[in-house]
């Protein structure tokens, strides 16, 4: 699970940057931290830029989205991209 931990740290860094608040726990909720749809679109663009993967919007627009859930979505997207030869 080392990869998931690294991804959680990256998600916390991105959310902190986007939301302007320090995100310190993998259990923190994007929308409770003040995130809204425009910030989520910004997060999706940053994920695409930094990880070279495109996440489906519906994966992240869920109630109670935590750092861990976002990291798992990135991990799954990376695996799917690797299997199809995309994302490199």
Image (spheres, rainbow, N blue to C red):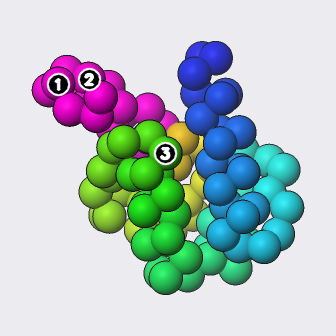
**What x and y, as percent, mark residue 56?**
28, 57
Q: Main secondary structure of the magenta part?
A: helix
- Residue marked by disc 3: 50
Q: Could you tell me which residue is drawn at 80 percent across and 57 percent down?
A: 23
Q: Is the residue 47 above or below the residue 62 in the image? A: above
User: N-terminal of the two: label 2 or label 3?
Assistant: 3
Whether the residues at callouts 1 and 2 have beta carbons within 8 Å, the answer is yes
Can residue 32 be seen in the rendering of this structure? no
Residue 24 versus residue 47: which sits nearer the camera?
47
Q: Name the secondary structure under disc 1.
A: loop
Q: Could you tell me which residue is drawn at 44 percent across and 72 percent down?
A: 41
- Residue marked by disc 2: 82
**What x and y, as percent, mark residue 1?**
60, 17
**What x and y, as percent, mark residue 29?**
66, 62
Alpha carbon distance from label 1 to label 2: 5 Å
Alpha carbon distance from label 2 to label 3: 15 Å
Q: Is the residue 27 above or below the residue 19 in the image? A: above
86 drawn magenta: yes
User: Tag 1: Cα neighbours inside 10 Å, few (<14), some, or many (≥20)?
Assistant: few
80 drawn magenta: yes
Q: Could you tell me which residue is drawn at 30 percent across and 28 percent down?
A: 88
| Mark identifier at residue 34 | none
Give the magenta range: 72-88
Give the foreground label among 2 and 3: 3
Whether the residues at callouts 2 and 3 have beta carbons within 8 Å, the answer is no
Q: Could you tell whether 15 is left or right of 86 in the image? A: right
Quarter location, residue 84:
top left
Q: Is the residue 60 above or below the residue 48 in the image? A: below
- Residue marked by disc 1: 85
User: N-terminal of the two: label 3 or label 1?
Assistant: 3
Alpha carbon distance from label 3 to label 1: 17 Å
């Amino acid at each position: 699970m080392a990869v998931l931990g690294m991804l959680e740290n990256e998600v916390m860094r991105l959310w902190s940057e986007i939301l302007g608040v320090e995100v310190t726990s993998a259990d923190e909720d994007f929308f409770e931290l003040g995130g809204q749809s425009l910030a989520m679109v910004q997060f999706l663009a940053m994920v695409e830029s930094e990880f070279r993967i495109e996440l489906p919007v519906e994966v992240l627009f869920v109630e109670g989205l935590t750092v861990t859930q976002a990291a798992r979505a990135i991990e799954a997207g990376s695996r799917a991209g690797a299997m199809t030869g995309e994302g490199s």
